[in-house]
Amino acid sequence: MSWFPAFRRVSACGILALSLSAQAEEPLAPVLSTVSPASQSQHAHPSQVASPLDGTPLSIQDAVHLALTDQPILLDREALVAAEEQQAISAAQLPDPKLSVGLKDLPFDRGEAFSVRDDSFTMFTVGISQDFPRAAKRRLRSERKRLDAEMDHYGLLNDRKVIARDTALSWLDVFEAEQALTLTHQLAVESGLQVRSMESGYRSGRNPQADLLAAKVEADLANDKEQDWQHHVERMRAALSRWIGTSAGRPLADDMSSIPEPVELTQVTAAIEQHPAVSGVQTQIEVSRNDIAQAEQAYKPDFSVEAYIGHRPAFADLAGVQFSVDLPLFTGKRQDPELRAAQLRSQAAQERKEDLVRELRAQATEDYVDWHHANERAATFDKEIIPEARRRTEAAQGAYAAAKGSLDGVLLARRTLLEIQIQRLALVVEAARAQTRLRYFASAGELP
């Protein structure tokens, strides 16, 4: 009966052969074993049972386009820009004139009390007055509003870049989770087939109970991993819906090849000077210079003119005109502090720009290093680690079939191969994330 152990091992390894042939495919490609309908339904994804994904595949460009098409944040910014452009027009105009109506010099005692006819000073007046701020002040106020609109415009451009980046990163999160789910789903299906094979062998006396229990534990662990990744898929799709709403429920395209590789690091860092965030801070510097100019204009007085007509019922009517002018006599506690404050704000804005450029350059350098490092590691996985892990699995299967190895060795080799494939997936997606983040620093362009 020496043929029994060998027959038992060959029977179990027949199932493992399916795993090896399927895993020989590209790790990131959707991989599903050819199994019976009953096996597929046993391991169906919860989301597919509850709410199947409908619609055309959602590429990363589609997601970004949807996020930028109907985005409340961008509509809010656009409204602010339009509002400040309108305010720039009104700020350049003279103030509205003022109409005055009154009764002057009405006596309230002696014989002429409350009479509008007995006293020659009593009169009804109607007048109009106009303030005349200096033309330079009006021009500077209008320019200030225009600069505010320009600053919000750069803020709008930066928001578009941020939304495009965050949407693409969210899409990549869903992509990674779904690809990992596909790998673990395959392992769960194969583990279920193996358990059924081991149960059949155990009932016929070909397989020991220990091997059957080991196969069941392996299947339970595979199912747990599948459920965990399903949880990640659902969470990541919920996060993607923040940017594209219900379109986050569409199935994803199955590749990331559309993301262009970044240019040289020197070109990326050079483009940062034209980044909308930097341009916005540069506009803040111009705003602070405008504030300095307005503070200097505050030393120069404005004037106003008033003309009126006085009607005296019992005497001749009168007319008059008067001028008033500001007297900036106490500049030490009014104009001087305002000027010093404007100068300090200008200095602060310049330092803020230098700090922002440093920060963006450091972030771009970090992302470039991450991209290069992730690509190198992924290449190592493709050329060395994954082929070696497959050969290890094949060797473990052969040893088990020849009664020279244990089932635990085969199961361990399979788990290790799956973990390595998921690590390789994480590296490829991390490289794509770094590419996406580097696109944020480009002076032009929003789509990945």
Image: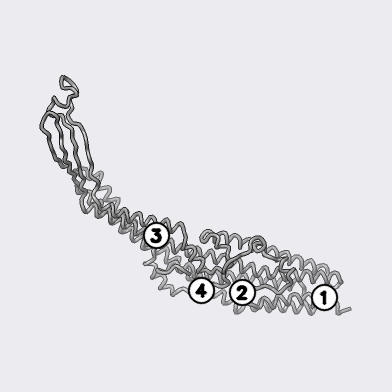
Q: Which residue is labeled 3 in the image?
A: 155
Task: Residue 261: tell me if it is visible.
Answer: yes
Which secondary structure lies at badge 2? loop
Residue 82, percent from left and from top: 36, 56
Please name the amino acid that badge 2 sits on. Answer: Ala
Callouts 1 and 3 close, C-beta under 8 Å = no
**How far apart are labels 1 and 3 at the CA level?**
69 Å
Label located before the other in sequence (4 or 1): 1
* Side of 307 relative to 224 (left or right): left
**How far apart are labels 1 and 2 at the CA level?**
33 Å
Q: Residues within 10 Å of mark 1 (few under 14, many from 20)?
A: many
Label located before the other in sequence (1 or 2): 1
**How far apart are labels 4 and 1 at the CA level?**
49 Å
Q: Residues within 10 Å of mark 4 (few under 14, many from 20)?
A: few
Please name the amino acid that badge 4 sits on. Answer: Ser
**How far apart are labels 2 and 4 at the CA level?**
16 Å
Q: Nearer the viewer, mark 4 or mark 1?
A: 4
Q: Is residue 293 above or below residue 58?
A: above
Q: Which residue is labeled 2 in the image?
A: 29
Quadrant containing the N terminus in the rendered view: bottom right
Q: Which mark is residue 101?
A: none
Please name the amino acid that badge 3 sits on. Answer: Gly
* Side of 219 relative to 267 (left or right): right
Q: Which residue is labeled 4 in the image?
A: 258
Q: Which mark is residue 8?
A: 1
Q: Quadrant of residue 54?
A: bottom right
